[in-house]
Amino acid sequence: MSEGLDDVVAARTVLSEVDGAAGRLVIRGRSLDDLASRASFEDIAHLLFDGFFDDLPRDLQRPLGEARASVFAHAAAVGELSGLDPVEAMRALTARLRDGDDLATALRLLAAPAVFIATVLRARAGEAPVAPDPSLSHAADILRMTHGRPAGPGQAEALDAYLVTVCDHGLNASTFAARVIASTHAGLTSAVLGGISALKGPLHGGAPGPVLEMLRGIGEPANARPWLEAALARGERLMGFGHRIYRVRDPRADALKAAVRRLGALQPDASGRVALAEAVEAAALAILKDRKPDRPLETNVEFYTALLLEAVGFPADAFTGVFAMGRVAGWIAHAREQVAQGRLIRPQSVYVGPQPKAA
Ligand code: ACO
C-alpha cells in the first residue's frame, strides 16, 4: 500500500514530464523555458489537444473566442451565486454546461473558467458583465472582461505567459482526479469539474495568497532578512519556497520571474514590487541555505505567480480560479488520453474495520 500514491505510476502520458531532480518540465517534447517565452495559451492548448480531436483546427484563437461567447450565455445565472467564493461560483456555472467528448465541448470548457471568473468578479463589485470579444487573444479578453477596459501595456502578454506556464504538470492531484472521472467515460465536463474541485484545496492550488501577505508584511527590501528570520524562529514556513517533487529550482518560477520582470519594466508602479520580491527571494534563499544546508529549498511556482497575478489586477481570492483558466487545457487533454487508453481506474483498499461476528 502507498498512502498518497507517492511512488505509484498510474498513467502513461505523452503530455508532460516533470523531472524533479533536473528541475525540468517538458510539454509534448518542448521545454517550458522555450514555451513560456514564445507560445500563446491558444498555441499550448493546440499542442496539448493535438491527436486527441480529429477535427482540431490549425489555429484555436477564433474558435476559442467563439466558445467564450457561447459560454457567456450561461453567465447570467451568476446572480443566484452571491456569497460563494470565486472558485465555487465558477464551478457552479461550469456545471451548467452540457457534458460530452467532442471538440465543441472541449472548447467551451477551455473558455469557461476565464468567462466565469471574470463575470463573478464583476458581479461581486456590482458591475455589469462584459461580453467576450472573440477577435481578441484569450489572455487579452480575460483582462478586458474582468476590468471592463483593454489590458494595459504588457499585461496580456504577462497573463499569457502565466497560463502557458501552468497548463500542465504531470499527474498532479487535479489532473489525476480528472483522469479518474474520464476513465468512467462520464464526459469532459464531469472530468473538468473534478479537476476544479481538487484544485480548490489549499494543498494544491491555493498557496499564492499567503505569498502576498508575506510581501505586505515585509513592506520594503531592508526589512526582508529580519522579517524572514523572525518568521522561521516562530516555526513558520516561508511561503513560495520548497516543493515536494523539485529538488532544484522549479523551472516555472524562472519562467514567471522573467514575465514579471518584463511587465515591471513597462509598469512604473509595479517595478517597486518586483524589486521588493527579488530582495525577499534573495534573502529567503540565503537564510534557507544557511539553516538547512542538506535540504535544497528553492523558489517554487507560487512566489512569482502571486506577483504576476496581482500586477494584472486579480484579487488574491481569485488566484485559484485564474490557475484553473490555464490548467483546464491539461485536464481536457489528460481526460481524452485516459479515454483513448480505455482502462477504468479502480485501485483497491485494505479493509481495517471489524469483521461480522458469527451468528
Ligand atoms: N520554509 C521553511 N522551511 C521549509 C520550507 C519552507 N518553505 N519548506 C520545507 N521546509 C523544511 C521543513 O520545515 C522540514 O524541516 P525539518 O526536516 O527540520 O522538519 C524540511 O524542510 C522538509 O519539509 P517537508 O514538508 O518534508 O518538505 P516537502 O518537500 O514535503 O514540502 C512544501 C513541500 C509543502 C511545498 C513545503 O516546502 C512548504 O510548505 N512550502 C511553503 C508553502 C508553499 O510555498 N506552497 C506552494 C508549493 S508549490 C505547489 O504546490 C504548486
Image (cartoon, rainbow, N blue to C red):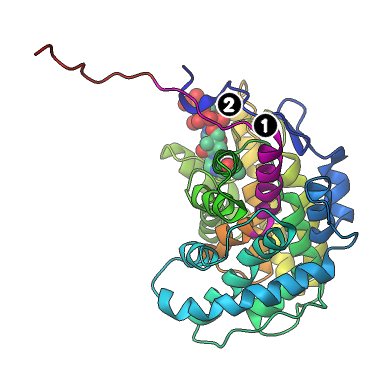
Q: Is residue 29 above or below residue 240?
A: above
- Dot 1 falls on a residue whose secondary structure is loop
Question: On the image, numbered disc 1 is attached to which residue?
Answer: 246
Residue type at mark 2: give it: Lys
Question: On the image, numbered disc 2 is attached to which residue?
Answer: 292
Q: Position of residue 340 (x, y in %)?
A: 71, 38
Is the residue marked by circle 1 packed among few (<14), some (14-19), or many (20+) residues within 10 Å? many
Kindly check if marks 2 and 1 are in contact, taking CB atoms under 8 A apart as contact: no
Q: Magenta stretch containing residue 341, yes or no?
A: yes
- Dot 2 falls on a residue whose secondary structure is loop
| Residue nearest the observer in this picture, 49 or 219 | 49
| Residue nearest the observer in this picture, 51 or 195 | 51
| Residue nearest the observer in this picture, 265 or 357 | 357
Is the residue marked by circle 2 packed among few (<14), some (14-19), or many (20+) residues within 10 Å? few
Q: Is residue 169 above or below residue 188?
A: above
Cβ of mark 2 under 8 Å from ligand 1: the answer is yes
Which span is picked out in magenta?
Answer: 325-349
Q: Position of residue 227 (x, y in %)?
A: 52, 49
Pick out the residue farthest to the left: 359
For image coordinates 76% across by 40% down, the residue present is 251
For image coordinates 49% across by 20% down, the residue present is 2
